[in-house]
Image (cartoon, helix red, strand yellow):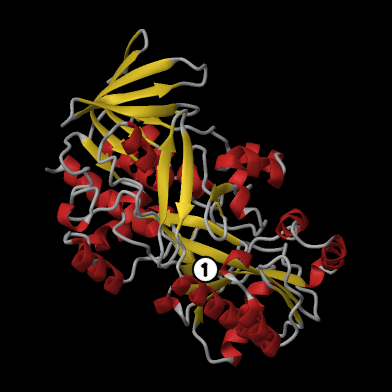
Amino acid sequence: MRTIRRGRIVETDVVVVGSGAGGSVAARELAAAGRQVTVLEEGPRVGTADLAAASQAGNMRRLYRNGGLTPIFGTPTIAYGEGRCVGGTTLVNGGLLWEPPPHLLARWAAQSGIDGYRAQDLEVHLKTVTTRLGVLTQPHGAGNRDSQLLAAGAERLSWDWQHADRAVRDCLHRNRCTTGCTSGAKQSMTVSYLPQAEALGAEIRPGTRVVRVLHDGRTARGVLAVGPDGARTVYRARAVFLAAGPLGTPALLQHSRIQHRAAGRRLSLHVNLRTIARFPEPVHADRGTIFTAQLKEFGDQGVLIMPANVSRGSLAAALAGRPAPDTRRLLADFDHLGVFTTQVRLHGTAAVRAVPGGGLLLRHAMTAVDHGALCDAFRKGAALLFAAGATELTPPVAAAPALHSPADAEEFCRRVRPRDWELVSVHGMASAAMGAADRGGVCDADGRPHGFRGLGVCDASVLPGVTGISPQGTIMAFAHEIVSRFNNP
């Protein structure tokens, strides 16, 4: 069935807003059910050859919202990064795909008052996702000496670690995961679900920003969007699925005055502490894939530790707040350095506020408990890296001296203040959470904003809480279930 165009009005069965993990699932499954699907994506469409031809810095500017530096104001300001391109953040993440733990899903069901998303409910969807994406346990392979050191340190401490589960086929270990895989090995939505959706008849329109959802107060009728040429177009549809991400979806709900008082009030975050470790032996951390080992010992506390993609440019950016002599010294030692990320699940939440003109104002309320959790997580990371053989650590605080022992790390934790931390986040969730209305939920068990028909939410914002793990697998499983309910009412 072809799209019918009448001037600046386009008629279609279903509009999907956003093309990341959730939107791509919606597009493929809706198209497979025989529906006419139009996917509207704000960012550009970039192929594997384009990624390989550009520099990492160029891809950062092109593929991330605000170049990867969207500020979340508070004490301290947190730099938030998310993809703004066809494929969304799946194009620029590490391709990690962990299945949500059954106890997490059971807790969400109890807290939200929403059932039907427990482990047994999502099992078939997770199997579909892992099969389609070719998820495998990533061995160390060529390079990844930083991952091998992490694993060795964990074993010396008798701490639990495991190889990474990744959506990847024939990885060439080019160390470009977070700025776009240059070989096509990483199974982002751009090389998996979206081409399948197009083969089933879906149409993808990049460079198209949705301004608001059109509705009559109870039922969605379509969306108003601005195309690459600046022209405003009405997309009339029988149903709309919002998958614009944990920032974009609540902003659209606010602009559209749909659950606008609740949407965006509680954005849950993982934050990352970035620690630079110097080893006496060469590490060559710029060789290999994103990482092949992750510390899981403290996962139940919301703390994970792993190596990070690193290049001379990214290291220089991480050191931007430090004195020039320190930066020069560390860059001179580049081959002996590893950069390690400690991921911490925050208890305090952030708020997303849509402002006129399409902008966003983000503000977090990190608590004293969170500061204590950051100190404890850094302490654990320091113990791990010293056990791995590190001789010097550079903590994620610009004014802090180098640390040479666990005692130095303990003294650092005693002195650091909440405003000192240099924090990054790439995982936001629950900003339009599924849950009973009397428990603060924005969406019902079918992913529909309470009180609305013909409108669904199927991205990270609909998750009932924060995962504590890389959320892509959880997002995709929830999206499969939500769309399945729509296709089979």
From the top left corner, tell me how far across and down residue 87 is, in percent.
47, 42
Q: Is residue 213 in view from this perspective?
A: yes
From the top left corner, tell me how far across and down residue 196 is, in percent.
39, 39
Question: What is the secondary structure assignment of the residue under circle 1?
Answer: strand
The residue lying toward the viewer, choosing from 74 and 488, is 74
Q: Residue at x 66, y 88 (%)?
A: 387
Which residue extends farthest top?
7
Which residue type carries mark 1?
A: Gln
Please say if 471 is above or below 195.
below
Quadrant position of the N terminus in the picture: top left
Occupied quadrant, residue 429: bottom left
Q: Is residue 448 left or right of residue 422?
A: left
Please say if 450 is above or below 348.
above
Q: Residue at x 28, y 50 (%)?
A: 480
Occupied quadrant, residue 316: bottom right
Task: Say which residue label 1 marks.
Answer: 343
